[in-house]
Amino acid sequence: MKYRREIDGLRAVAVVPVMLFHAGFQSFSGGFVGVDVFFVISGFLITSILLSDLSKNKFSLLTFYERRARRILPVLFFVMLCCIPFSWMWLMPLDFEDFLQSVVAVATFSSNILFWLESDYFATASELKPLIHTWSLAVEEQYYIFFPLLLMAGWRFGRRQLLIVLSVLFVLSLGLAQWASVEHAPANFFLLPSRGWELLIGAFAAFYINKNGDVSASPIIHQVMSFLGLVAICCSVILYDVNVPFPSVYALLPTLGTVAIILFAREGTLAHRILGVPPLVGIGLVSYSAYLWHQPMITFAKYTHFGEPSAQFMLMLLLGSLGLAYLSWRFVENPFRDRKRFDRRAIFTGSIVGTLLMIGGASAALALDVGPRTQAELTPSVGLYKAENRQLRMNSWVPLRTLSGNEEYRVDGNPFDRELWFDDSDDRRKLLVVGNSHAKDIYNLFMASEGTQQQFQVARFGSEMGDIDESFYTSPNYLAADVVVFVSQYKRSDLPTLSLPISRALKDAKQTVIIKNIYEFEEFSNRTYADFLFRQLLQERGSDQISAADIAAINHRHYLQFIERESSHRILQSDEAISTLASAYPALIVLDRMDYTCDAAAQTCFAMDDQYQKYFYDYAHHTMEGIEFFADRIDAIDWLEALSDRR
């Protein structure tokens, strides 16, 4: 097929918003749609080649996969190799293990499946995974395992029958995406079945052009349709954000916009002139390399910074990734596409050897526990300080996982929560803690508190507040409970329905408690505000001149300023909603976690002990060391006094 420079320009329109979105530029809140644009372009170009070969009766699977290997693998392996030493130097041990697993997954084009399986509460934030962006490559390659075979099998039955089959698959895939965008969002985002329709849109455009040639329409139609296609993509980039269910029918806007450009952006149209400008065409030519480079660079920048890198720094980083993209395009991509320099045998041999080296090397490193030894140089070795917050988070779930006998016990959806925990032969009152991960903290806190244990048996029911339904009210622990304690992070979507479980529990004659949202300190990638203060004071004073009291005092000053912070608005809204509930339901008991996490009289907000063991592993969740300390605090201040008074 003939070269179309506007498609390279379209690639630039796809990759630049993706890069800016990942870099955190809010004006490009929908930049993730660039991946969807890429899917359509890929579906169009690859299908065009396949149809051309099939029409000439010269299609070869071997030739097809040779083209894919030349296009995809050399620069992919090169970028992965470059990521390995920096990951070893900078990532925490558990994150480095995840990285090695992702290397294996990328080499086998299954990284989308890996990242889907990791997309739960316990996973590292996606922006801290150097190879997270390779999920889209995996989707494409999985698609191109099956699609050529389907075309080959269906070609003998005729174009019309083949299009009917593809149309059915398109409708099923789009329907699945719409349904799963609400019911199974992570799987919907990462997996092929709900993404295939986007590649098929491009394939349908290729079928049309293969049969009919360029669209025959008036110049005004070409102008309007191609320009509207460009507007559709730009509107998606600007107006969409992470709260839009995706992919779903919302993805039709950028994908149909892409098809409109492919079909109608001919020479002379405004869209063709815009997309054909040299800077866009140049970026489009190196777009694959740019896509590969930008995510690791952003990840490592965020991982090694305390605080969000500045917009200027991130912009320079993206420009640097474009520079690297040009170099890898010129010295890696282009040479391997040259059949005179690397014949088919060399490509397949190199692909197999490279794949086996990636899989074998990463697997061996995992088996031999070749952790990032240089991380010790970046992590202060003072007292009992631990930098690995992921491990501290996992430790906080151990009591519930041990009790339930379920290593997968989590925030919600636990079968064990629907079993009876209470012992009827025990005279203590039965207290049920209900909520999300914060309910886990309160459960741990009550179990560690001597005063609480003297008065109550304690159980937990895991659920987001907005998901509480009749299955909770019929659960044995709820039916047996004397006291029901609700605790959550209270999302904005929870607030309108917050009165429902409160009123139901009061109606069922339960002593009902709601715990206010805890103040949320900043996080810096996977590090806490206490990590930041600890490292800062360590650098300024040295290990002999800092104390937990210093950090606690700074914490307190920071807490007092929270009303002025934008991040506090949601917390203030939930506090206001809880105050409204307390006015409407006089029997409702309201507790404030800040009463035990801070001491107003001493002007202290506790963060770590004298051995530098942290009390929080993220913005607000307690470590097990924090649980032990705060359990003594709630006993000392008699935090649960109101429960005894209203017996």
Image (tube, grey):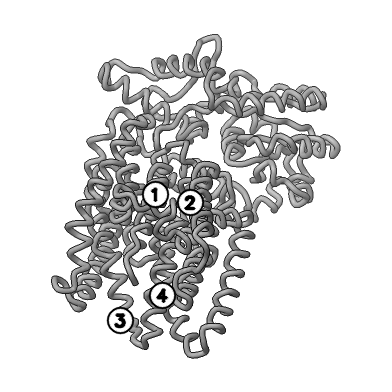
Question: Type of residue at label 2?
Answer: Leu
**Mark 2, residues whose alpha carbon is within 10 Å: few (<14), some, or many (≥20)?**
many
The answer to whether the residues at label 2 and label 1 have Cβ atoms under 8 Å apart is yes
Percent across and percent down for residue 505 are: 80, 38
Q: Earlier in the sequence, mark 3 or mark 2?
A: 3
Relative horizontal placement of residue 71, taking residue 419 as reference (left or right): left
Q: Mark 1 points at which residue?
A: 274
Question: Type of residue at label 1?
Answer: Ile
**In whole angstroms, how far apart are the C-alphas of marks 3 and 1?**
37 Å
Residue sitting at x 78%, y 44%? 480
Secondary element under disc 1, as helix, strand or loop, is helix
Question: Type of residue at label 4?
Answer: Ile
The answer to whether the residues at label 3 and label 2 have Cβ atoms under 8 Å apart is no
Q: Mark 3 points at which residue?
A: 62
Q: Name the residue under label 2.
A: 230
Q: Mark 4 points at which residue?
A: 145
Secondary element under disc 2, as helix, strand or loop, is helix
